[in-house]
Each structure stands twice: as C-alpha cells, then as structure tokens.
Image (cartoon, rainbow, N blue to C red):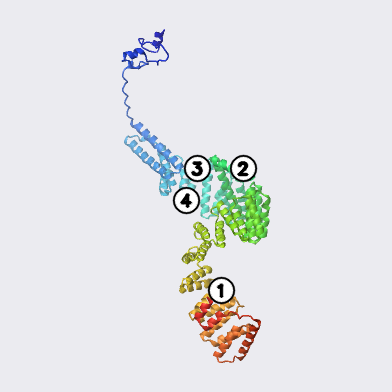
Amino acid sequence: MPQSRANGFGRNTETARPMTSNRAAGYTAAGKAGGGKVFDPLNQGDKGAAKPLEKKTELSPEEKLREMEKEIHRLVEESAITRERGNLREALEKGKEAGKKERQLCRLREQQNLLDQLNVDLTYAVCLNLAIQHQANDNDNEALTIYTQIVKNKQYPFSGRFRVNMGNIYFKQEKWTAAIKMYRMALDQIPNNVQAIRFKIMRNIGHAFFKMHQFPDAIDSYENLLMHGAQHLDFMTGFNLILCYYALGDKDKMKSGFLKLLNIEQVGLEDFDEEEEIELGQTEQQKQESATRNLTEGDDALREDIKRRQREAARFIVNAANLIAPVIEKTEVAGFDWVIDSLNHHGFPRIGSELEIAKSCFFLRRKEFDQAIQVLKKFERKEPSLMACAATNLSFLYFLEAEHTQAEKYADIAVKADRYNARALVNKGNCMFMNDEFERAKEVYLEAIGVSADCLEAIYNLGLVNMHIGKYQEALLAFDKLHSITHVNCEVMWQLGDIHEKLGNHAKAHEWFSLLVTSPKGRPTDPGVLARLANLFNKAGDETQAFHYHLESYRYWPVDMNVITWLGIYYVKQEMYEAAIPFFSRASQIEPNEVKWRLMVASCYRRMGAYPAALKLYEDIHRSHPNDIECVRYLITICKEMKQKYDHYAAHLRKLERLQAANEQPGRNMGTVSAIGQGGREASDDTM
C-alpha cells in the first residue's frame, strides 16, 4: 500500500517512506546516505533541459503603422487631460508632438503606397486638439490658422460648427464684426433639431451686438431666445437684455425684461431662499458645527456648482433691480416699490429685503434721513443678518445727525446680531470716540481690523484716535499700512505728512505734501496742502518757495487769513507797500469788525508817501471807531507831517487816555500797527 501511494504521486519506489510525521516530505534518510539525490518531487528533471525562447517575429509595416496610430491617440488623450488639469503649456507641447507624429505617419503611408489606409478621423482629432491647445494658450493666430484648415476640409464631418471657436477668438480680440460673421456661418451649419447649440450661438451674436452698442440688433438676438419659453435664457443674457432696454429708455420693456429674468428656471435656484432661511435659523453653535463639518468633509462638486449658480443669479437680479428701480416709474420710490413687490411675488424675499436696504441708501444719498430711518426700522423684526445690515446703516445715519446715543444703540444691535460685522464695530468705535472714550474706541477699531484686515475705515480711524491721544508712532504705522493698500489716497497722504510734521520730521512731511500735490491722482489745487508746503519752506528759511506756495494757496482760496497775513507782511518786509495793500484790504473785508486791517492799509499808504489817501482812510476809521486810541495817534502824526491842524484830535486823545486810566483798562495791543508805522522789519518780527 505504501508503494502504490508513492507511485501515485510519481515518487521513486526505491525511496524509503518516512516513519514519522516530523520529517519533511521529500527528505529521507536514504537520500542523505546516497549524497547524490536532488530534491525533485515532481520528477521535472526527467524532462531534460528547457527549450530555447522563440524569437519574436518582426512587425509588418501595417502593424508598425497601427502602433504609431495608438501612440498618436495616446498623446492626444494625454494632451486633453493635461489641459483639464490646468497645465496649458505642457498640454500644448503634447499636442504638437502628436501633430508631428501624425505627419510622420502620413509620410510613411505614402512611402509604402498605403494611402488607401489614411486615418482621416485621427488627423481630424489631432488638428482639432492642437487648435484648442493654441486657443487655450492665447496663440490666437495659430489657432485661427488651424481652425480655417479644418472648416475648409470637406472630409471632416461637422467641421463647420468650429466656426464658433473662431468667433470666440474674434470676440476676445474685440473684432465684433468678424465674430458675428463666424457665428452666423456656424449657425447655418447647425441642423434645426439641435436647438441648444443654435440658441447659444444666437446668444453670442447678441453679446457681440451689445458690445458694439447696437442695442436694437442685440435685442432681436436675445428675444429670439424667448420665443421658446425662455428655457434657453440664462441670467447673463436676461441682464444684458434689460441693459439694452435701459439704453433705449423703454420703461415697459424694462419691466417685462425684469419679470422674464425672475422667471428663468435654473437647477438649484429653486431652493435658494430655503437655504438662506435654514442658515439664518441656526444658532451660533450650530453655525460653528456646520462650518467645522464643511471644513472637514467639504461640499461635493455638484453642491459647489449649485452655490456658484445661486450667487451668480442673485448678483444679476440685484444689479438689474438697482438699475431699473429709479427709472421705471414716475418717482424713484414707486420704482423701488414695484421691484420689491415683484421680487417677493416671484419667490425672492431675501433679495427683496436687500432692495429695501438699497431703497434706504437712495434716501440717504438724497439726504432724506427721516425716510431712510423709517425704511430701515422695518428690519428690526426680520432675520438677524438683514437686521444687522439695517442696524449698521441706522447707526451711521444717527451718527451723521449727531445723535450719538441712538447711533451707539443701533451699533450695539448690529454687533450683537453679527459679532464679525466690521462696519458695525467701526460705528461703535466712532460713538466711543465722540464720547471721549479714546482707549475703548481704539480697542474696538482693532477688533474690527481683526475681523476684516482690509477694513479701510477701521484702519483710518485707528490712526486718528492714536493721533488724538498723542501716540504718533502708532498712528504712523496705521496710516503707513493704509497707504500700502490704497497707494494714492489723498486723505492718507495728508495724515502722513501731518504726523511727520508733528514729529519734527520736516523733510518727510515735505515729501508727503509734495507727493500730494504732484501725484496724478493728487490735489494740485488744494489750498490747504499748498499752505502747509509754504509753512514748511518758511521753517526751512526758503522764503522764495514759501512766497510761491502762499501765493498759489491764495489764488485757489483767497479767504485764508493766515495766508493773507503772511503775504501782506512779506510785501511789507520787501517794502512793496503797494502790493501789500490788496491783501490787507481783503483781510478787512473778511473781518470788517477788526480795525487793525484798515489801519495796516492806511499805514501802507503813509509809508508810500500817499498822505492824502492815508489821511482820508484814517478819518474814515475814526468816524466808524471814534474810541480807537491808535487811530487817533496816527491822525495826529499824519496831520503834523502834512502841517494840518490836529488840536481837536489831541484833545480827543487826552480824553480817551483819561477814560482808559479811569477804567484801568489796558490799551489794545496794537503792536502790529505800530510796527508797520515804524518800519517793515519790525512789522514782520512782531506779527510773526
């Protein structure tokens, strides 16, 4: 029995059977004793040596060509996939390589007389892919050349529709006429049963006419889309149609176009407001949990696309509503009311509420604050996000009207509804600033910046509050940051110049004020900036430049008393009394109750030697101000110089001096007048 089992497995019958199960199969004592046995349980050694490998037969020419076709097809697919991944340059290189190999394949077929096996479809695919890759890389001329070859080749099926691609290139190049021509030629190639593509081409034709400002032709193209129930109308097309009606001033068509825009059916739009309500109804904890879940799991691609469509639709609807509301009715308010009713009726209450806020902003622009407040107060009973927006605007309105208590109240409401509302925090900080709570205001501004790092109002106000409490270096940091964001904002450059001047950095202050005057978007005619530059030059001892900028400032704002005084004193210093007279005369017109300006004019006449004019002016001053001691003294002096009687003036002077001594009232400081009478140098010293 043991032998029969061994033979059944092809074992050698002379080999002893193992006596125990601990010895491995195939390893026996007999084998060990012989020393020449090889472990071969399947007796494969009896078959002899292995046969040599067969040589691979050489590929035939047809097989080589088929392998090349596979390689070309692989390159085309890789090129398309690479383009979808965003690597446009590599995709173009693969497309070029595919084109090169395809031309090599055609030459080989021609050399081997296999022209009947030319793969037209492969050539078509290679050329089309290469054109698409050139178009994606903005190589418009190369793409147009290949597209032209494709559409002219009658062997390529449906090649005429690629005139749409050519039209798109011309559209991008703003060659509207050529684009329209290509679109129309492509439209002739599209069969009538392919309605979706035909309507998209018609939409593109309308866009081209719109760009050319040929609004009637654009309307014709757009309205063709409405003939089939508007199922092919998208929000951009509907918005452009409203713009065309607006350009032509057709109010009825604007209304109908807006209603058509609201009736557009789009996947995902039907639950737009429901999603908003769900989000608004969540507590803060639920919102945080939802945000955490979205961060960890993320929305799928379909959900992201639906959200993008919803945002885009809302943007077009809001823009269209804001555009037509002020013009579709006899009054702007009636227009807003019609738009809001239409939005609520068609299932867009959220956007309707936004239009309510836009309506309040319209009142605000017209400075009709009471109506704006009335509209915004309606939001106190609405959802939190809208209430926060309305409360922010209400706070701003009350702040403008200097009702700081009410402004702070609504700022607190807005912050409570949305702690991350940067504008509400700015309003709250402004109220604290007006209540002299500067440190608290600074903290709130910093919190607003933490919420929104690019909140310009918060950064600007932070700089102001730091200046107010004397922390100029911190204010400088805030305005420097603001300047890095805005670049050429005039208010920011003014504050930077002002801070540097306060810090004693006159060179930097001069640099900022000069930039404010010379910048293309600056203020070269701002009299305040010119006066500041003049003062900086004056401090630096450059009177020539100081005079130039003071004169420029006076030219644009001839009522600045500081500038007028400086110019008048400058001419007195130069002993150009005749030139100084117009400035002192202007000062007397601005401050008619101030006697010193008319006395300065009279002193200039006296220094010029025009004694009759000086005497006449002194007498006029004495009649209007009979108790002015300085004027009486000048009258006595000039009468002596002109050898006229002055006894009555002398008597009046003694009387005034006795009254002054009796009342123990010191005389009015007439240092400026006396100095002008004595000489130009003393006048400048006392006045300045």
Query: In the image, which is nearer the foreground, mark 4 or mark 2?
Result: 2
Horizontal and vertical percent position of residue 161: 47, 43
The answer to whether mark 2 and mark 1 are in CB contact below 8 A is no
Q: Amino acid at mark 3?
A: Ile
**Distance between the alpha carbons at the discs numbered 4 and 3:** 23 Å
Name the element at disc 1: helix
Q: Earlier in the sequence, mark 1 or mark 4?
A: 4
Horizontal and vertical percent position of residue 383: 65, 48
Q: Earlier in the sequence, mark 2 or mark 1?
A: 2
Of the numbered discs in the image, which one, if any, rests on residue 561? Answer: 1
**Distance between the alpha carbons at the discs numbered 1 and 3:** 78 Å
Q: Amino acid at mark 1?
A: Met
Name the element at disc 2: helix
Q: Which residue is mark 2?
A: 286
Horizontal and vertical percent position of residue 435: 63, 60
**Distance between the alpha carbons at the discs numbered 2 and 3:** 52 Å
Residue occupying the point 33% across, 35% down: 113
Residue occupying the point 48% across, 67% down: 506
Q: Which residue is mark 3?
A: 190
The answer to whether residue 355 is visible is no
Report crowding for label 4: few under 14, some 14 to 19, many 20 or more residues within 10 A (C-alpha): few
